[in-house]
Image: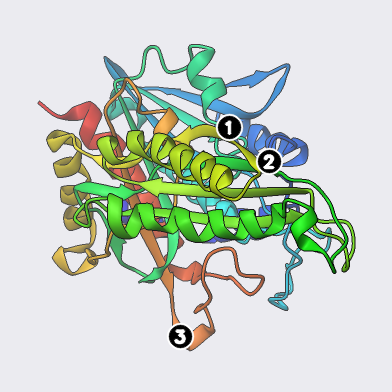
């Protein structure tokens, strides 16, 4: 039933994906995107919630019978990437859906179509969240903090992923995506002529030493069985080629799955930063910000519903393994107090050139399998609401 409906709406899903792909908008500024989503949901006869101070929307589909509430989530923002795919529907505005959020929206619209056809059979309510600002790491917080999840019993989300073959799903239990936190390190020294470095306190040399030393947290302080990453992504400062630098700023990110490991990183980095600075005669300050929690599929019931949905629709062969990844997802803000499940939809297909990684300017997908993602979302919602 759901499989057949998904095939029926395949052309609709592709059409929506192509339209949305052409109008990518950056995080928290998805105005035209939101307008299009609202339009499509209202065409289906849904009640739609919008927000006076925020982008995104929530479609509400009430089933024919009372019951629980399940939320399906799709993110809607794009990246500041200049598209190089050469597709006839490529973006021309300097931004790009290089992480595939156009597909997420189209898949969810397809699931909405399917569930609308089946609404009389549903025992409960489906809330379809089209979420602003995933790429900045905190967009989902708005909907949780404003109470739009207060009546939700479970949350489902997926991400289209280039490491998984098109037509396959990765729906594994346990740790799937890492936490993402950020830091800024400011180093203050004193300038001197480059020919007499002994007369100054070199902030650049100290900063370089800090970069090298903080890698010792991962290699020597952290338990190697609990994965962690510390990356310094920028280093800026200095005045001129022949002046000892007096000010350097660095920014970076940390990733972890284990809560104990994550909680230990800030303190360990602070000790390394401050003590390295003291040893080299400069001062250094660490500013640390916590963004997203790790994604961990730890609800046995939801894990089973998701896997069984895929098997019911497309058989055991539709399930593909994939190692957990150090990338992060602000879906974690939606499941702080609510059970959730997060999976991956494959899009890799060498025959059509869909071989590039997410965030690449060449990223594209095998559209012919998108309807399978819509079927999976609809089946998950249907089975969760109608389970005995």
The residues bearing labels 1 and 2 have C-alpha atoms spaced at a distance of: 8 Å
The kind of secondary structure element at disc 1 is loop
Question: Which of label 3 and label 2 is nearer to you?
Answer: 2
**Outermost residue, left direction?**
388
Q: Is residue 146 above or below residue 357?
A: above
Describe residue 277's horizontal placement relative to residue 313 as left or right.
right
The kind of secondary structure element at disc 3 is helix
Q: Classify residue 31 by image quadrant.
A: top right
- Position of the C terminus, as image quadrant, is top left
The residues bearing labels 1 and 3 have C-alpha atoms spaced at a distance of: 33 Å
Upstream in sequence: badge 1 or badge 3 = 1
The residue indicated by pointer 1 is: 139
Residue depicted at 32% across the width and 20% down the height: 337
Contact, mark 1 vs mark 2 (Cβ under 8 Å): yes
Residue depicted at 30% across the width and 61% down the height: 169
How many C-alpha atoms fall within 10 Å of the one at disc 2: few (<14), some, or many (≥20)? many
């Amino acid at each position: 039933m759901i499989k057949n409906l998904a095939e029926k709406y395949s052309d609709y899903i592709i059409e929506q994906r192509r339209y949305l792909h052409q109008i990518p908008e950056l995080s928290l500024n998805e105005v035209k995107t939101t307008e299009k989503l609202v339009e499509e949901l209202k065409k289906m006869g849904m009640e739609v919630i919008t927000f006076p101070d925020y982008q995104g929307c929530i479609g509400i589909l009430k089933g024919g019978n009372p019951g629980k509430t399940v939320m399906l989530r799709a993110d809607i923002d794009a990246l500041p990437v200049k598209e190089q795919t050469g597709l006839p529907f490529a973006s021309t505005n300097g931004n790009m859906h290089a992480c595939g959020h156009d597909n997420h929206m189209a898949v969810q619209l397809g699931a909405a179509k399917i569930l609308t056809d089946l609404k009389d059979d549903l025992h409960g309510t489906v809330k379809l969240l089209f979420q602003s600002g995933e790429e900045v790491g905190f967009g989902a917080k708005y909907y949780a903090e404003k109470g739009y999840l207060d009546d939700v019993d479970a949350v489902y989300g997926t991400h289209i992923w280039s490491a998984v073959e098109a037509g396959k799903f990765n729906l594994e239990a346990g740790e799937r995506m890492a936490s993402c936190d950020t830091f800024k390190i400011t180093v203050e020294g004193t300038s001197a002529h480059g020919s007499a470095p002994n007369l100054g306190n070199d902030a650049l040399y100290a900063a370089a030493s800090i970069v090298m030393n903080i890698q010792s947290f991962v290699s020597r302080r952290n338990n190697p069985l609990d994965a962690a990453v510390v990356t310094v992504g920028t280093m800026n400062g200095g005045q001129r080629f022949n002046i000892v630098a007096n000010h350097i700023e660095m920014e970076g990110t940390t990733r972890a799955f284990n809560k104990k490991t994550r909680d230990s990183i800030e303190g360990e980095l602070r000790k390394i930063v401050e003590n390295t600075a003291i040893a080299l005669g400069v001062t250094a300050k660490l500013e640390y910000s916590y963004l997203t929690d790790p994604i961990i599929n730890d609800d046995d019931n939801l894990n089973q519903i998701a896997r069984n949905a895929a098997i019911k629709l497309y058989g055991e062969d539709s399930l593909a393994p994939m190692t957990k990844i150090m990338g992060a997802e602000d879906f974690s803000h939606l499941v702080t107090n609510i059970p959730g499940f997060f999976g991956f939809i494959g899009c890799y297909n060498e025959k059509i050139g869909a071989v590039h990684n997410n965030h690449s300017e060449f990223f594209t997908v095998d559209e012919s399998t998108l309807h399978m993602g819509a079927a999976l979302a609809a089946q998950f919602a249907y089975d969760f609401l109608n389970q005995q």
